Amino acid sequence: MKKITTGKICALCLGDFARGLMGGIITTYLLTFFIPTSASSTLPQFFLNAALTMAIIRGIGTVVDAVTDPWVASLSDNCKSPLGRRIVFMRWSAVPYGLFCLLIFFPPVQGTSTVNALWVGAMLILYYLFSTLYNIPYGALQAEIVAEPKKRVFLYTMVSLFYVLSSALVFCSSMFKSMLMKSGVPEIWALRIPFIVFCALGAVTALVPAFAIKEKDYVSPKPYHQSIWDALKATASYPSFSIITVGYLIMWIAFTFFNTAEVYYITNLLGLGDTWVTIVSVLSIAFGVATYPLVNLLAARVGKKPLLLGAFITYTLLYCAIYNYELVISLIGGPVFAILIGLVIAMPIAITNIIPASMFADLAQYDSILTGQNRAGMFLAARNFANKLCQAVVAIFCSLLLTVGSETGAATSQGIRSTALVAMIFVAIALVIYSFYNDREISRVIREHTETK
């Protein structure tokens, strides 16, 4: 088997650039597009009871997304294509992945209609389906293609870099919207135009690793003959897997509340314009990327767990400050607070994008060493299954929470502020759960196996 080069790692990670683009559009702009604030009153109301409708649509979509993960993982793990177990899925799903992401924002009826709600629901489900068909095999390929734990940290550093760069690009949608509106473009198209560009770019970059990587040059398939249910049970049997999975899903409940409301924090709570959304995003990305070498160094020196716990403590303090935004603004002002959000969150984002993914990949390799079977796809799916089921609940409650106290269905300051409180509570719980994780045994087995080979 060949050892993957740095250039091929970069080509492989372009799939995460695509994931950041399309996932960022859905996470950041789905609610602001269909549940606008009073400041965005020119956006049409596509269906009645927007908050409740979007809660139901997102909840159903996320459940469908969750239950398809183990199915796709099983298909991929058992695939016998000449191209490999992962690449064939990536090639066929990349373009529909971008297309259905875009079509969500093009309801067919120009006005309020039940047809629009059905359209958005159907397109969102199709988006989640093709996202799963691409990302489950893609994530498994990443775990398989780099077998050395130290190099794996570098891989997931590059994964994080590409992901956060594309996420930052998505946040520029607010700036592009302002520029287009000043040129006379209606607000709805001022949002749609960036979405068209990003979805097209996402589909193209998703195709790159599917054709640039020859899977069988780097991965030697091992026999695999397990049903979905048996594979899930075997995967969940590791105590370490249970700890990091529960911690991961609790962490992402917090992040989902925060990410969904982040645009609202800047524009509503701090009273700043759309351009500030881009400024905060650029600051967090730039300083986050600058910390990547430090994260890699500290992961090697002090271990992954201390870094992760430190990130959670920082998140907890930041979310607490946002919840008490009036006090903070009275002390330092809205613009300074926005800048601090971008700076303070930078390194924690880098850590939580790199370290948990590396832990899951380590555990998948540990399982392969002990059992002789390669179930990397199922490890990824089992993690995502639990994670997305919880996010389905978050999707419902976050949509409703944003409109607390509103008679018109628009997001309110009270509701927006409450999302920060919920995020703070859940990230504190994740901190406690991850404190029980012990990766010494897993690292020892992988190290001894690598030295023996």
Image: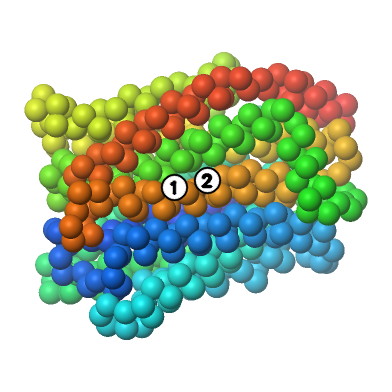
In this orientation, which residue lies closer to the viewer: 429 or 286? Answer: 429
Query: Disc count in the image?
Result: 2
Tell me where residue 405 appears, x and y as whole percent: 20, 49
Give me the disc on residue 390: 2
Residue farthest along the top direction in this orientation: 302
Give me the disc on residue 394: 1
Q: Quick check: 60 left or right of 236?
A: left
Q: Residues within 10 Å of mark 2 (few under 14, many from 20)?
A: some
Asked which secondary structure carries label 2, the reply is: helix
In this orientation, which residue lies closer to the viewer: 54 or 331? Answer: 54
Position of residue 58 relative to residue 254, above or below, is below
Residue under the image location 60 percent in, 54 percent down: 66
Asked if the residue under mark 1 is in contact with the one under mark 2, i.e. CB atoms within 8 Å, the reply is: yes
Residue under the image location 37 percent in, 64 percent down: 53
In this orientation, which residue lies closer to the viewer: 403 or 342? Answer: 403
Q: Residues within 10 Å of mark 1 (few under 14, many from 20)?
A: many
Residue under the image location 31 percent in, 36 percent down: 420
Tell me where residue 421 appears, x and y as whole percent: 32, 33
- Circle 2: residue type: Cys
Whether residue 281 is visible, yes or no, is: yes
- Circle 1: residue type: Val
Query: Image quadrant of residue 445?
Result: top right
